Amino acid sequence: MTLEEMESLMESIGQPKYRAAQLFNWIYKRAILSFDEMTNFAKSLRQQLDNMADIGYISIEKQVTSTDEQTTKFLFKLKDGLCVESVFMIDGKRRTVCLSSQVGCALRCSFCATGKMGFQRNLSAGEIVDQLLAIQRALNVEATNIVIMGMGEPFLNYDEVIKACDIISHDKGIAIGKRKITISTSGLVPAIKRFADDGQRYQLAISLNAADDEIRNKLMPINKKYPLNELINAARYYAAKSRHRITFEYVMIGGINDRIEDALKLAKLIKGWKCKINIIPYNAIDEKQDPPSEETMSAFIRPFLKLNVVISVRRSKGVDINAACGQLYYKHKENNFILEVDK
Ligand code: SF4
Protein backbone atom coordinates (compact mmCIF):
# COMPACT_ATOMS: atom_id res chain seq x y z
CA MET A 1 0.00 0.00 0.00
CA THR A 2 1.08 3.53 -0.73
CA LEU A 3 0.67 6.24 1.90
CA GLU A 4 -2.46 7.47 0.09
CA GLU A 5 -3.95 3.96 0.21
CA MET A 6 -3.20 3.75 3.93
CA GLU A 7 -4.88 7.14 4.41
CA SER A 8 -8.03 5.77 2.75
CA LEU A 9 -7.84 2.67 4.93
CA MET A 10 -7.55 4.74 8.10
CA GLU A 11 -10.31 7.10 6.95
CA SER A 12 -12.61 4.12 6.32
CA ILE A 13 -12.35 3.18 10.02
CA GLY A 14 -12.69 6.73 11.30
CA GLN A 15 -9.01 7.25 12.17
CA PRO A 16 -7.17 10.56 11.64
CA LYS A 17 -4.80 10.98 8.70
CA TYR A 18 -1.62 11.06 10.80
CA ARG A 19 -2.27 7.43 11.79
CA ALA A 20 -1.63 6.45 8.16
CA ALA A 21 1.80 8.13 8.25
CA GLN A 22 2.56 6.22 11.46
CA LEU A 23 1.41 2.97 9.89
CA PHE A 24 3.52 3.67 6.78
CA ASN A 25 6.55 4.26 8.99
CA TRP A 26 6.00 1.07 10.98
CA ILE A 27 5.62 -1.07 7.90
CA TYR A 28 8.38 0.31 5.69
CA LYS A 29 10.86 2.10 7.92
CA ARG A 30 10.76 -0.21 10.93
CA ALA A 31 9.83 -3.24 8.80
CA ILE A 32 7.62 -4.84 11.44
CA LEU A 33 6.06 -8.21 10.78
CA SER A 34 2.97 -7.94 12.97
CA PHE A 35 0.48 -5.19 13.92
CA ASP A 36 1.11 -6.08 17.55
CA GLU A 37 4.52 -4.40 17.34
CA MET A 38 2.92 -0.98 16.74
CA THR A 39 3.20 0.21 20.32
CA ASN A 40 1.83 3.72 19.70
CA PHE A 41 -1.49 2.24 18.45
CA ALA A 42 -4.24 1.20 20.88
CA LYS A 43 -4.70 -2.54 21.17
CA SER A 44 -8.19 -2.27 19.70
CA LEU A 45 -6.85 -0.48 16.60
CA ARG A 46 -4.11 -3.05 16.16
CA GLN A 47 -6.73 -5.79 16.35
CA GLN A 48 -8.97 -3.96 13.87
CA LEU A 49 -6.08 -3.60 11.40
CA ASP A 50 -5.16 -7.23 11.84
CA ASN A 51 -8.73 -8.22 10.91
CA MET A 52 -8.69 -6.02 7.81
CA ALA A 53 -5.20 -6.27 6.45
CA ASP A 54 -2.21 -8.51 6.14
CA ILE A 55 1.47 -7.69 6.56
CA GLY A 56 2.67 -9.98 3.83
CA TYR A 57 6.24 -11.09 3.72
CA ILE A 58 8.28 -13.40 1.63
CA SER A 59 10.42 -16.11 3.13
CA ILE A 60 14.07 -16.75 2.48
CA GLU A 61 14.47 -20.07 0.69
CA LYS A 62 18.21 -19.78 0.24
CA GLN A 63 20.86 -17.19 1.11
CA VAL A 64 24.43 -17.38 -0.16
CA THR A 65 27.32 -14.97 0.47
CA SER A 66 30.34 -14.75 -1.82
CA THR A 67 33.78 -15.62 -0.46
CA ASP A 68 34.80 -11.92 -0.47
CA GLU A 69 31.61 -11.17 1.54
CA GLN A 70 30.68 -8.32 -0.81
CA THR A 71 27.68 -9.99 -2.38
CA THR A 72 24.77 -11.90 -0.90
CA LYS A 73 22.22 -13.55 -3.07
CA PHE A 74 18.73 -14.46 -1.89
CA LEU A 75 16.22 -16.88 -3.27
CA PHE A 76 12.80 -15.91 -1.90
CA LYS A 77 9.68 -18.01 -1.78
CA LEU A 78 6.44 -16.17 -2.47
CA LYS A 79 3.09 -17.02 -0.93
CA ASP A 80 2.07 -19.14 -3.95
CA GLY A 81 5.30 -21.14 -3.70
CA LEU A 82 7.04 -19.55 -6.69
CA CYS A 83 10.53 -18.16 -6.20
CA VAL A 84 12.42 -15.01 -7.15
CA GLU A 85 15.96 -13.81 -6.63
CA SER A 86 17.47 -10.61 -5.26
CA VAL A 87 21.07 -9.60 -4.67
CA PHE A 88 22.74 -7.37 -2.11
CA MET A 89 26.07 -5.86 -3.17
CA ILE A 90 28.65 -3.78 -1.32
CA ASP A 91 30.77 -1.40 -3.36
CA GLY A 92 32.68 1.13 -1.23
CA LYS A 93 30.02 3.11 0.62
CA ARG A 94 27.29 1.89 -1.67
CA ARG A 95 24.87 -0.77 -0.53
CA THR A 96 22.94 -1.78 -3.62
CA VAL A 97 19.99 -4.13 -3.77
CA CYS A 98 18.99 -5.64 -7.09
CA LEU A 99 15.28 -6.50 -7.14
CA SER A 100 13.17 -8.75 -9.36
CA SER A 101 9.99 -7.50 -11.00
CA GLN A 102 8.55 -10.73 -12.43
CA VAL A 103 8.74 -14.46 -11.80
CA GLY A 104 10.64 -15.60 -14.88
CA CYS A 105 10.64 -13.56 -18.07
CA ALA A 106 9.02 -13.90 -21.47
CA LEU A 107 11.77 -12.13 -23.41
CA ARG A 108 14.30 -14.97 -23.59
CA CYS A 109 17.56 -13.07 -24.01
CA SER A 110 20.16 -15.67 -24.96
CA PHE A 111 22.65 -14.71 -22.23
CA CYS A 112 20.16 -14.76 -19.35
CA ALA A 113 19.27 -17.65 -17.05
CA THR A 114 15.89 -16.08 -16.20
CA GLY A 115 14.98 -16.04 -19.89
CA LYS A 116 15.33 -19.83 -19.93
CA MET A 117 12.58 -20.18 -17.29
CA GLY A 118 9.89 -18.54 -19.39
CA PHE A 119 7.35 -16.17 -17.87
CA GLN A 120 5.30 -17.20 -14.84
CA ARG A 121 3.73 -14.05 -13.42
CA ASN A 122 4.16 -10.40 -12.51
CA LEU A 123 5.14 -9.48 -8.96
CA SER A 124 2.92 -7.12 -7.00
CA ALA A 125 4.40 -3.85 -5.72
CA GLY A 126 4.30 -5.44 -2.25
CA GLU A 127 6.36 -8.42 -3.37
CA ILE A 128 8.93 -6.10 -4.95
CA VAL A 129 9.26 -3.90 -1.83
CA ASP A 130 9.28 -7.01 0.36
CA GLN A 131 12.50 -8.29 -1.25
CA LEU A 132 14.22 -5.13 -0.04
CA LEU A 133 12.70 -5.25 3.45
CA ALA A 134 13.62 -8.91 3.86
CA ILE A 135 17.24 -8.27 2.82
CA GLN A 136 17.58 -5.26 5.13
CA ARG A 137 16.15 -7.33 7.98
CA ALA A 138 18.27 -10.43 7.30
CA LEU A 139 21.57 -8.55 6.97
CA ASN A 140 20.76 -5.71 9.35
CA VAL A 141 21.73 -3.13 6.72
CA GLU A 142 20.17 -0.13 5.01
CA ALA A 143 20.37 -0.06 1.25
CA THR A 144 21.61 3.14 -0.41
CA ASN A 145 20.81 2.24 -4.02
CA ILE A 146 18.23 0.13 -5.80
CA VAL A 147 18.40 -1.43 -9.24
CA ILE A 148 15.37 -3.12 -10.75
CA MET A 149 17.52 -5.43 -12.77
CA GLY A 150 16.77 -8.86 -11.35
CA MET A 151 14.37 -11.39 -12.83
CA GLY A 152 11.89 -10.03 -15.36
CA GLU A 153 11.37 -7.05 -17.64
CA PRO A 154 10.23 -4.20 -15.33
CA PHE A 155 8.37 -2.35 -18.08
CA LEU A 156 6.14 -5.37 -18.69
CA ASN A 157 5.00 -4.80 -15.11
CA TYR A 158 5.12 -1.01 -15.32
CA ASP A 159 2.44 0.03 -12.83
CA GLU A 160 3.52 -2.28 -10.00
CA VAL A 161 7.21 -1.43 -10.50
CA ILE A 162 6.54 2.32 -10.38
CA LYS A 163 4.30 1.85 -7.34
CA ALA A 164 7.08 -0.12 -5.60
CA CYS A 165 9.63 2.60 -6.45
CA ASP A 166 7.24 5.27 -5.15
CA ILE A 167 6.96 3.38 -1.84
CA ILE A 168 10.72 2.81 -1.59
CA SER A 169 11.53 6.47 -2.29
CA HIS A 170 8.84 7.99 -0.04
CA ASP A 171 10.47 10.15 2.62
CA LYS A 172 8.20 8.84 5.39
CA GLY A 173 9.35 5.28 4.77
CA ILE A 174 12.51 3.71 3.39
CA ALA A 175 13.41 7.07 1.80
CA ILE A 176 15.91 6.05 -0.85
CA GLY A 177 16.17 9.02 -3.24
CA LYS A 178 14.61 8.69 -6.70
CA ARG A 179 17.97 9.33 -8.35
CA LYS A 180 19.36 6.32 -6.46
CA ILE A 181 16.79 4.00 -8.00
CA THR A 182 17.49 2.62 -11.47
CA ILE A 183 15.03 0.76 -13.64
CA SER A 184 16.65 -1.35 -16.34
CA THR A 185 14.73 -2.27 -19.48
CA SER A 186 15.58 -4.51 -22.40
CA GLY A 187 14.19 -1.82 -24.69
CA LEU A 188 10.39 -1.66 -24.73
CA VAL A 189 9.97 1.44 -26.85
CA PRO A 190 6.39 2.47 -25.91
CA ALA A 191 7.17 2.05 -22.20
CA ILE A 192 10.33 4.17 -22.48
CA LYS A 193 8.20 6.93 -24.04
CA ARG A 194 5.58 6.53 -21.34
CA PHE A 195 8.28 6.72 -18.66
CA ALA A 196 9.49 9.98 -20.23
CA ASP A 197 5.96 11.40 -20.62
CA ASP A 198 5.08 10.48 -17.04
CA GLY A 199 8.04 12.60 -15.92
CA GLN A 200 9.45 9.79 -13.77
CA ARG A 201 12.55 10.89 -11.86
CA TYR A 202 13.99 7.40 -11.47
CA GLN A 203 17.11 6.57 -13.46
CA LEU A 204 16.74 4.61 -16.66
CA ALA A 205 19.15 1.98 -17.93
CA ILE A 206 18.77 0.25 -21.27
CA SER A 207 20.21 -3.19 -21.81
CA LEU A 208 21.72 -2.61 -25.26
CA ASN A 209 24.28 -5.39 -25.74
CA ALA A 210 24.83 -4.82 -29.46
CA ALA A 211 25.18 -1.91 -31.83
CA ASP A 212 23.61 -3.54 -34.86
CA ASP A 213 20.30 -5.29 -35.43
CA GLU A 214 21.82 -8.52 -36.66
CA ILE A 215 23.65 -9.26 -33.41
CA ARG A 216 20.97 -7.73 -31.17
CA ASN A 217 18.29 -9.90 -32.83
CA LYS A 218 20.31 -12.98 -31.90
CA LEU A 219 20.94 -11.90 -28.32
CA MET A 220 17.60 -10.25 -27.59
CA PRO A 221 14.54 -11.39 -29.56
CA ILE A 222 12.70 -8.22 -28.41
CA ASN A 223 14.87 -6.35 -30.92
CA LYS A 224 12.82 -7.83 -33.77
CA LYS A 225 9.82 -5.95 -32.41
CA TYR A 226 11.65 -2.76 -31.42
CA PRO A 227 14.77 -2.49 -33.61
CA LEU A 228 17.78 -0.39 -32.66
CA ASN A 229 16.85 2.80 -34.52
CA GLU A 230 13.45 2.89 -32.76
CA LEU A 231 15.09 2.12 -29.43
CA ILE A 232 17.72 4.83 -29.84
CA ASN A 233 15.05 7.35 -30.86
CA ALA A 234 13.03 6.48 -27.75
CA ALA A 235 16.15 6.77 -25.59
CA ARG A 236 16.93 10.20 -27.08
CA TYR A 237 13.32 11.24 -26.48
CA TYR A 238 13.64 10.19 -22.83
CA ALA A 239 17.04 11.88 -22.41
CA ALA A 240 15.73 15.16 -23.88
CA LYS A 241 12.61 15.15 -21.69
CA SER A 242 14.20 14.04 -18.44
CA ARG A 243 17.63 15.69 -18.86
CA HIS A 244 19.02 12.59 -17.17
CA ARG A 245 22.18 10.89 -18.29
CA ILE A 246 21.01 7.57 -19.66
CA THR A 247 22.90 4.35 -18.95
CA PHE A 248 23.45 1.65 -21.55
CA GLU A 249 24.24 -1.80 -20.21
CA TYR A 250 26.41 -3.93 -22.47
CA VAL A 251 26.75 -7.59 -21.53
CA MET A 252 29.94 -8.53 -23.32
CA ILE A 253 30.12 -12.06 -24.69
CA GLY A 254 33.34 -13.52 -26.05
CA GLY A 255 33.45 -13.65 -29.87
CA ILE A 256 29.88 -12.33 -30.23
CA ASN A 257 29.78 -8.60 -29.45
CA ASP A 258 33.28 -7.88 -28.16
CA ARG A 259 35.11 -7.08 -31.42
CA ILE A 260 36.66 -3.72 -32.25
CA GLU A 261 34.09 -3.27 -35.04
CA ASP A 262 31.33 -3.65 -32.42
CA ALA A 263 32.99 -0.97 -30.28
CA LEU A 264 33.25 1.39 -33.28
CA LYS A 265 29.59 0.86 -34.18
CA LEU A 266 28.58 1.53 -30.58
CA ALA A 267 30.75 4.65 -30.42
CA LYS A 268 29.06 5.92 -33.60
CA LEU A 269 25.62 5.19 -32.21
CA ILE A 270 26.14 7.26 -29.06
CA LYS A 271 28.43 9.97 -30.46
CA GLY A 272 27.55 13.46 -29.22
CA TRP A 273 25.35 12.05 -26.52
CA LYS A 274 25.90 12.49 -22.78
CA CYS A 275 25.48 8.95 -21.59
CA LYS A 276 27.03 6.19 -19.57
CA ILE A 277 28.05 2.73 -20.74
CA ASN A 278 28.34 -0.16 -18.34
CA ILE A 279 30.29 -3.07 -19.73
CA ILE A 280 29.29 -6.28 -17.96
CA PRO A 281 31.48 -9.29 -18.74
CA TYR A 282 29.19 -12.22 -19.43
CA ASN A 283 28.67 -14.52 -16.47
CA ALA A 284 28.52 -17.96 -18.12
CA ILE A 285 25.30 -19.93 -17.63
CA ASP A 286 26.17 -22.71 -20.07
CA GLU A 287 28.97 -23.75 -22.40
CA LYS A 288 27.42 -22.13 -25.47
CA GLN A 289 28.66 -18.60 -24.74
CA ASP A 290 31.91 -17.45 -23.08
CA PRO A 291 33.02 -14.39 -21.12
CA PRO A 292 35.35 -11.98 -23.01
CA SER A 293 39.09 -11.90 -22.27
CA GLU A 294 40.68 -9.01 -20.33
CA GLU A 295 42.60 -7.91 -23.46
CA THR A 296 39.45 -7.79 -25.59
CA MET A 297 37.69 -5.68 -22.97
CA SER A 298 40.57 -3.19 -22.78
CA ALA A 299 40.67 -2.89 -26.58
CA PHE A 300 36.88 -2.46 -26.70
CA ILE A 301 36.74 0.52 -24.37
CA ARG A 302 39.57 2.45 -26.10
CA PRO A 303 37.40 4.18 -28.78
CA PHE A 304 35.17 5.62 -26.03
CA LEU A 305 37.91 7.36 -24.13
CA LYS A 306 37.81 10.32 -26.57
CA LEU A 307 34.02 10.69 -26.35
CA ASN A 308 31.85 12.50 -23.80
CA VAL A 309 30.74 9.23 -22.17
CA VAL A 310 31.35 7.64 -18.83
CA ILE A 311 32.39 4.07 -19.44
CA SER A 312 32.83 1.51 -16.74
CA VAL A 313 33.48 -2.18 -16.61
CA ARG A 314 31.32 -3.77 -13.97
CA ARG A 315 33.31 -6.65 -12.63
CA SER A 316 30.90 -9.50 -12.20
CA LYS A 317 30.09 -9.65 -8.53
CA GLY A 318 29.45 -12.93 -6.80
CA VAL A 319 30.63 -15.20 -9.60
CA ASP A 320 31.17 -17.95 -7.03
CA ILE A 321 27.53 -17.75 -5.92
CA ASN A 322 25.83 -17.61 -9.34
CA ALA A 323 24.80 -14.01 -8.74
CA ALA A 324 23.75 -13.10 -12.27
CA CYS A 325 20.02 -12.76 -12.88
CA GLY A 326 18.23 -16.09 -12.67
CA GLN A 327 21.36 -18.13 -12.06
CA LEU A 328 20.66 -19.18 -8.50
CA TYR A 329 17.14 -20.28 -9.39
CA TYR A 330 18.47 -22.10 -12.43
CA LYS A 331 21.18 -23.97 -10.52
CA HIS A 332 18.76 -24.63 -7.66
CA LYS A 333 16.34 -26.19 -10.10
CA GLU A 334 19.08 -28.18 -11.84
CA ASN A 335 19.92 -29.69 -8.48
CA ASN A 336 16.30 -30.80 -8.16
CA PHE A 337 15.39 -28.61 -5.21
CA ILE A 338 11.64 -28.31 -4.93
CA LEU A 339 10.81 -24.67 -5.42
CA GLU A 340 7.10 -24.57 -6.11
CA VAL A 341 6.10 -26.37 -2.95
CA ASP A 342 2.64 -24.98 -2.27
CA LYS A 343 1.15 -25.40 -5.73
S1 SF4 B 1 17.89 -10.12 -19.55
FE1 SF4 B 1 16.07 -9.23 -18.57
S2 SF4 B 1 14.62 -9.04 -20.30
FE2 SF4 B 1 16.19 -10.48 -21.00
S3 SF4 B 1 15.37 -12.53 -20.48
FE3 SF4 B 1 16.67 -11.83 -18.75
S4 SF4 B 1 15.23 -10.92 -17.33
FE4 SF4 B 1 14.20 -11.01 -19.32
Image: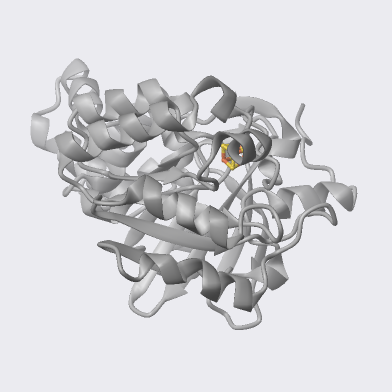
Relative horizontal placement of residue 82, taking residue 335 as reference (left or right): left
Give ligand 1's quarter of the image.
Answer: top right
Seen from the viewer's position, the closer of residues 333 and 279 is: 279
Q: Residue at x 52, y 34 (%)?
A: 153
Say above or below: 92 vs 290.
below
* Quadrant that contains the N terminus: top left
Return the x and y of residue 131 as percentages of the image width and height.
49, 48
Return the x and y of residue 200 as percentages of the image width and height.
22, 35
Say above or below: 280 vs 124.
below
Return the x and y of residue 180 as percentages of the image width and height.
27, 56
Return the x and y of residue 90 as percentages of the image width and height.
45, 73
Residue 32 in view here:
no
Say above or below: 295 vs 123.
below
Q: Residue at x 53, y 75 (%)?
A: 298
Q: Residue at x 19, y 27 (%)?
A: 4
Seen from the viewer's position, the closer of residues 93 and 284 is: 284
